[in-house]
Image (spheres, rainbow, N blue to C red):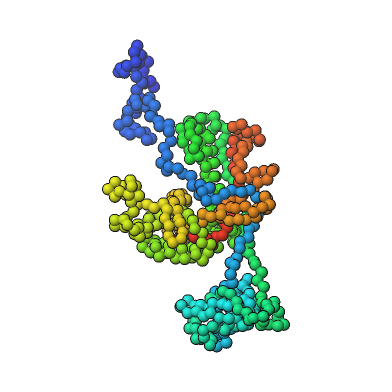
Amino acid sequence: MALTPQFGSLVPSQTQQLLATNYLQWTNNGGGAGIPANFSDFAAQYLPEIYEQEVERYGNRTLSGFLRMVGAELPMTSDQVIWSEQNRLHIAYDNCTFVSATGVVTVNPGAVAGVTNVISVNSTVVIMDDFGAEAKCFVSASVPGAAGTITVQPYTAANLAGSGLVGAVKVFVYGSEYAKGSTTPNYNAATAPAGYISVTPSFTQFSNNPLIIRSKYTVNGSDTAQIGWVEVATEDGTGGYLWYLKAESETRLRFEDYLEMMCVEGEIAAAGSAALANGQIGTQGLFAAIQARGNVQVGFSAATGISDFDDILRNLDTQGAIEENMLFLDRQTALDFDDMLAQISAGQAGGTAYGLFENSEEMALNLGFSGFRRGSYDFYKTDWKYLNDASTRGGMTGPASIEGVLIPAGTTTVYDQILGTNIRRPFLHVRYRASNADDRRMKSWLTGSVGGAFTSDLDAMEVNFLSERCLVTQAANNFVLFQGV
């Protein structure tokens, strides 16, 4: 077999120059796997031009940071966190039925569990329906309990028929009226219907349980010896050259995102569910807490935005009426808010708000709003990347889509069992397991026999991550979840 090139066909040159006799040449113009037919293999001796720096084509890929903005992190030592929330101060009942002729009002016609009649004799009440009619009455008799009733005497009519009340009514107490020299004896079944019903304050108790979340990155010993450098700038603020630990860095970032995503998306395993049958208990995240105990606004849009938003305000008035609130929205809902505010913006040409360069229309337009005041409430609006990112909820539409959330910016006073005193906490806060023996807020450790770890005969390095935590959503009645249609 002839050798190509043959001995003596190469003549080295004394200078670094390209000559017909001093370079290696292969004739493979027929092409091959991935090689064009007219490719000259002479170029194969040159190294390709390599960009060492990694291209950040998705920008900052991390999603965490939401809970750090609106909440706090606090340690706990138990398998469950329990908190109590106040009930309403005043006495009121919805969806009551009545008999016009006798004035008997059934305050709990559906026998709803936990609802009892505590309206005393001699109380004064307002009875109103959904059509504008109302009657102010004196309570002449009262039967307490879950199936309780009251007998009322209108102040301005012979009976309830004269008040024009129709359908289900609402009843609330606004005071009382007693005769001169009278007493206020306690209610006694033997002396019914006369008597005063003592109202014992009650509270509603909620709980949540932490979940253990884990992750691991593994690299075998052989791969650690094959070092390939790449220049990176990570989302956690670090930068420089990394080799196999580049993947460890991304595993850590992904795990830190999961710590927040679990608190946002968590769901309690329902009775009869497959997860519960498998021993998984779940945890109540932010979305589930608002859907269960808060307010849900469906189908917010720029066209009906101001009326929809005013409905939210009216509902907030019936709840805690917290003055400052934060709006975390996806892109479309944020634009709907901007369009809504631009339409009602007063004193600007065409209803457009100019926000840059001293509000000069000729210089620049700012079509976005970061904060506004409506009624007695202040709102601060921002985009929530979690709702925009394509790898999470970004791009989702339909009834199940989450388009934003309204979170009160206040704090609540609760009793801390660890400190033994009342402290103020934000409505949203994360509880993580910790004690003097072990802090499980965010643990990481190495196992194996590579990379400085000598814990087993495994020819690999395992980077382990673990945390145990849950989210506490207090006073969820002040939260609003925006959902699609």
Tell me if 155 is positioned left or right of 10 in this view: right
Tell me if 88 is positioned left or right of 237 in this view: right
Q: In x, y percent, where is residue 347?
A: 32, 57
> In which quadrant is the N terminus drawn?
top left
Residue under the image location 35 percent in, 33 percent down: 35
Residue under the image location 63 percent in, 60 percent down: 84
Q: In this view, does 16 lie above or below 247?
A: above
**Residue, far front:** 180
Tell me if 42 is positioned left or right of 132 in this view: left
Q: Is residue 48 above or below residue 11?
A: below
Residue 472 picture quarter: bottom right
> In which quadrant is the C terminus drawn?
bottom left
Residue under the image location 33 percent in, 51 percent down: 354
Q: In x, y percent, where is residue 233?
A: 46, 36
**Residue, far top:** 14
Q: In x, y percent, where is residue 202?
A: 64, 66
Residue 333 picture quarter: bottom left
Residue under the image location 46 percent in, 63 percent down: 313
In front of the other: 127 or 468: 127
Q: In this view, does 308 lie above or below 392?
A: below
Q: In x, y percent, where is residue 428?
A: 56, 54
Residue 361 visible in the picture:
yes
